Image (cartoon, rainbow, N blue to C red):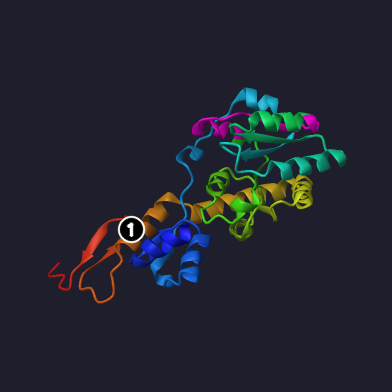
């Protein structure tokens, strides 16, 4: 369906802005659009990620453990079968102080809680329910790392993985069982570890590797995440890039537009006149 819509509508566009490299590759390689027409500009992190919010009750609840936070608003974007198998491997390895904190709610919650109880994972997996965006911060603050355990279908999605930009703002390592696009971001940033989706043993090994890493290594990954986010998911820079695309001078046009450092639009005239 998307392929049909894309061929019917997008091919007629002068320029296209997409949020992910994978979407850009689709337009260039599959639809054979000229690369100069396709612009990849990822979204910026949510504004509330700039705040520092601490909750004493949350801090006390998860004190003394290695906390891995998962964001899944409707409890349907993460591969819980793979996650739970990795959790069982952690228990079999004698690991008892890792906590998976899942933020989200949905129809699957009773089923997931029943499964964690059956697998004796209640001391390792915690469901914190659905929270307003600004309340996510108090959980992000106590995280030692973030995890995205993607479903196989989601790993092929053309959409930008928004949680990446959100997680990077908090200077914490990122673990991802994911597709090519997410792997590329994390590897380029040097901010975490990756494995293939639907790979419980790979996920287990990745978690253990991070868990055993020295504190300074974790801090380095966190700093790398923040630096990558500032360079690539920066709101002001992305606005400038969008404006440049919208007002870029077309070939053979007499008039065009440029963007100065203060993000002001300036029309370029053939005859600028006297100063």
Q: Is residue 64 visible?
A: no
Magenta stretch in the rendered image = 118-139
Q: Is residue 193 left or right of residue 168?
A: right
Q: Is residue 200 visible?
A: yes
Q: Which residue is mark 1?
A: 243
Q: From this viewpoint, which residue is outermost toward the top?
A: 57
Q: Quadrant of the C terminus?
A: bottom left
Q: Is residue 104 left or right of residue 79?
A: left
x%, y% of residue 249?
28, 69
Q: Residue drawn 51% across and 66% down?
A: 25
Which of the 4 quarters of the picture holds residue 271? bottom left
Where 78 sits versus 57, above or below?
below
x%, y% of residue 111?
68, 31
Residue 274 or 211: which is nearer the viewer?
A: 211
Where 25 sits versus 138, above or below?
below
Residue 261 or 5: which is nearer the viewer?
A: 5
Residue 62 or 94: which is nearer the viewer?
A: 94
């Amino acid at each position: 369906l998307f392929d049909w819509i894309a061929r019917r509508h997008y091919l007629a566009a002068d320029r296209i802005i997409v949020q992910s490299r994978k979407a850009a590759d689709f337009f260039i390689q599959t639809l054979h659009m000229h690369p100069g027409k396709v612009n990849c500009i990822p979204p910026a992190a949510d504004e509330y990620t700039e705040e520092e919010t601490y909750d004493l009750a949350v801090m006390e609840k998860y004190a003394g453990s290695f906390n891995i936070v998962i964001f899944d608003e409707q409890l349907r974007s993460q591969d819980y079968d793979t996650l739970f198998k990795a959790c069982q491997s952690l228990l079999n390895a004698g690991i008892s102080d890792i906590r998976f904190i899942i933020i989200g709610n949905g129809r699957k919650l009773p089923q997931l809680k029943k499964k964690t109880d059956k697998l004796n994972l209640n001391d390792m997996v915690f469901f914190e329910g659905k929270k307003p965006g600004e309340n996510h911060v108090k959980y992000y603050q106590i995280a030692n790392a973030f995890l995205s355990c993607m479903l196989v279908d989601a790993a092929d999605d053309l959409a930008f993985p928004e949680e990446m930009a959100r997680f990077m703002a908090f200077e914490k390592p990122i673990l991802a069982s994911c597709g090519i696009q997410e792997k590329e971001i994390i590897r380029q940033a040097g901010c975490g570890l990756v494995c293939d989706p639907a790979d419980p043993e790979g996920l287990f090994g990745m978690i253990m590797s991070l868990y055993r890493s020295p504190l300074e290594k974790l801090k380095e990954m966190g700093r790398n995440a923040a630096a990558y986010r500032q360079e690539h998911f920066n709101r002001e820079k992305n606005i400038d890039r969008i404006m440049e695309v919208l007002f870029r001078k077309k070939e053979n046009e007499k008039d065009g537009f440029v963007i100065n450092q203060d993000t002001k639009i300036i029309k370029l005239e053939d005859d600028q006149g006297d100063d």
